[in-house]
Amino acid sequence: MMRPSTTVFSLVLAVALVAADPSIVVTGQLLAYQDGFVFFTTGDGFRVAPGVVIRDAKTGAATKLSPAPRIWARATFDATGTVTELDLSRAALPPEGNFADVMRFAVAASSPAPNPDLLAYQNLATPAPGGGLPAGVSYSGKPVLVTFIVQVPPTTPLTSSVYISTDQSAWNAQAIPMDRIDALHYEITRRYPSGTIFNYLYDRGSLQSEEIAQNGLSRKPRKFVVPDADVRTVSDTVYAWQDQVPGSINQQQPQIMPTPYNPAPFPNLPPNLPPPQPPGNKPPI
Amino acid sequence: MLMLILASAAARAQTTPTTLLYLNAKSINFYYDRFLLEADGNVRLRTSDGFTVTGDAFSMDLKLNRFLVAGHVTVHDASGTVSGAAISDFLDFKRIYFVPVTSVPDRWTFLNGDLVHPAKGRVMPDDAFYFPPITTKPDMTGTGAVVGTKSYVRFIGAVAYVGGVGIPLGSNVISFSSNQYLAQNSLSGATADITWQVAGSPNALTALHLRYDPTYKVYGSVEQHFVGDHEYAILSVNPATRAEKWWNAMLYEKLGSRFQIQSFTQYYAQQNYLQEPRAAQQTTWINATYAFPHSYVTATSQLVNYNVLGPGSLEEPKAIGGNLSHPSFAQITANSFQNKIANLPLYENIYEGYGFAHDTVGSQQYLNGFAQYPQYPPVQVPGLQSYGALCAYQPPTKGNLQYFCPTYTTIYNTVLGFNLFTPSLKLNHPDSPYQQYYFNASLNKQRQWNSLPHYIDNTNTTLTISRQPSRSLHMYAGYEIQNIGDHYINGGYEQCTGPGTTYCPDSFTSFRGVATLRTTSFGFNDVPSPDFNFSLLVRHHEDFPIPVPGLFAFPANNILGQPLYSWWLGQPPYDATADVRFKILPHTLADISRTLYWYGNPYRAQYWQQNFVIQLLPI
């Protein structure tokens, strides 16, 4: 026979259990809804109650939406970890609850096993500019201010515009215009999500005026991985522009000097100036 | 031709691994700003890795090179079929993450393409099954797509959206390859160009262009790219829909780590469709470079044939065009690397070259008019190669043709030059870096001896002082002296007649072929954030000969309206260029610039650059 105090305690406990809402609510984006399970984009699958209630997340009324990939859902779990209600929306729902609280309800046939791919790179330093992205490294994607400073050849005209062309913009030669900061340097600051990988080259506005390597050959694009940092400065040196290499097609030919009849680079001298003359005005044959 | 074959063969043999993904779905959308490919409804994906996936939704980040199929997924390969909730393939890392649903869900990881032995229960990356948030409308839709990973996506039943209006294209290729050779193009500039890339692969791209320029108006062009890791071949005809056709071939090959050769050939034909040309010319430019440990040698040659039509094509009365000039030049030049001079804050590089130019005046040099047709009188040919020759004597005739003054048809030259420059030198040592001044100086000197006898001197000296007064501000002041001398050992420039007249202003009376341009510059730019930029460049020129308004024609601009030349004789003594860039869309900057030119006293004339230069730039 129970003592009165024990009976009272049991009743209070029962009332407290009944009064406390045992359900847990989380929001997330659906990955799949099939075979009696609902899957979120975390990859976790949860059992769905046979009579699961499906509602519109905004109005709480019935909805024509069906649980499907890309749909956002507010999921209500009962004490056993079964999803009893799904409130659906095409638009992202404000965060609610914490997936950590329901992870124990996720159904998986196999026990979790460590992933060496992830462990190997947990404490890896950010790769230096020019370094590749190691396999398995993940970045937060936060915006990072990246400043590019390039030293150009001393033959670069003071009025020249310098650009960065990248594979992000299909190698558009005028994709990223830079600002001159002194006789030899140009600079530009852009914001990129960390983890962005891009290949790039400097040019003077066209593919014909692209940078070349110091050894005169066309150079491989530079590679840059945006690190998980607040800011990053990248300093490069351009040794020569393709269209300025001595001896190239732009080699000065006799007829391009400022004789009155030569069209370039003086397309504009007055037409009545006489041509250069030899002594005695005789043909030097 | 050999280079073309090499480039094509190498392009085919390229070893860069590319997985092909064949995608079909009820709807396929492409988002250009983030290179996202999204598909929904009856998704079916076949991969060249040997498996097929079906599902409800597909998402691929083309840049990250990974895809996701979710909802009622089946994975089928030679070993059988498995059902699941989602599969995600990280192609670069050879990891496939799969959520199978047998009796209950599970987590399997397929390693290195082994679909038979999954690693069960492995922890997966947190974002393995995430859909990217999409807030914009698609830029392109299609009913099918073929993805060549890391290089291109070809849409089937493509519809491109411009300003919300759909343009059906059928097949359309979007290239996102990191191979910069795919961006090489052999077309001349145009005012406007709409490109339709109809076919493509990791190593090839076929594009049709609808273009406009003031000369040919609206016309179509065709361009074909073949690229490899170390070579490319670009072929085009532009315009393709006009009688004046320019056939272009750009070839490039890098052999080993020290040698490269490239060429550009342009064949001009005036012909209706592909009928017999009424005129045809050809220009070929070849350049080869060999790199040494601390220097390199480059050889360049250009050959021009103004008449490719064959014998008799110039003979009256059945002349169909062209002339007999064959301008050509060849030059070989040795260049040193940049070297530091002892322990001085000074760097140098030198270069020396030898070469010749033949018939470089080009078209109309020898042949002018026809002896038996006085209505086409001979015209005096000025220029260096008729140096001193007013053609007072009667040139010999050959048939119906007259040949004029073939003087100095070949001019040999020797070039010697050097560059000397300082890195940024600190002028003071303040506590704050924002009070730091830097100094830069550079000198370029070159002399070219010609066999004319004649030599050309170029000297260019630049001095700048710069400072960054705050995080966002940069400013510099510069002084540049450019001296170009055209020196004749005998004879040379004569004093122009009628001093003080329109065509012979004062400074021209003493002009003997040596021009000096002195430029003082002040540059300023303010970049408070990556989304906004303002810059200003003010310059003052003190030039000889003195620029006189109206005397000098303005130099040509590029198709954007920007001057093609950084300096020219007759440039107004003052100019100021303002440029502002600001963000107008999440992934687009607008860039607006304009220049004001004025002559100061005594002319006081001024004019604006003919229009604002407005560009839209990707972020």
Image: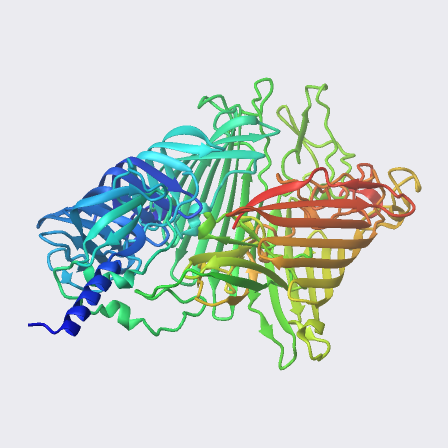
Measured from the top left, where is residue B113 in percent x and y? 18, 57
Measured from the top left, where is residue A93 in percent x and y? 37, 49
Q: Is residue B49 above or below residue B391?
A: below
Residue B94 in view (yes/no): no
x 77%, y 45%: residue: B596
Q: Residue furthest bottom?
A: B343
**Left or right of B242: which side holds A25?**
left
The colouring scheme, among rainbow, by chain, secondary structure or one colour, is rainbow
Q: Is residue B39 above or below residue B529?
A: above
How many numbered discs? Answer: 0
Measured from the top left, where is residue A48 in percent x and y? 18, 50
Instruction: Determine which quarter of the picture holds residue A53.
Output: top left
**Camera-nearest residue between A163 and A95:** A95
x 29%, y 55%: residue: A25
**Left or right of B109: which side holds B563?**
right
Measured from the top left, where is residue B108 in percent x and y? 16, 59
x 43%, y 29%: residue: B166
Instruction: Determine which quarter of the picture holds residue B226.
Output: top left
Residue A50 in view (yes/no): yes
Q: Residue furthest front?
A: A4
Q: Is residue B569 above or below residue B437?
A: above
**Camera-nearest residue between B280 and B536:** B536
Instruction: Determine which quarter of the picture holds residue B171.
Output: top left
Q: Quadrant of the N terminus of chain B?
A: top left
x 82%, y 40%: residue: A273
**Camera-nearest residue between B24 and B234:** B24
Q: Is residue A150 above or below residue B138?
A: below
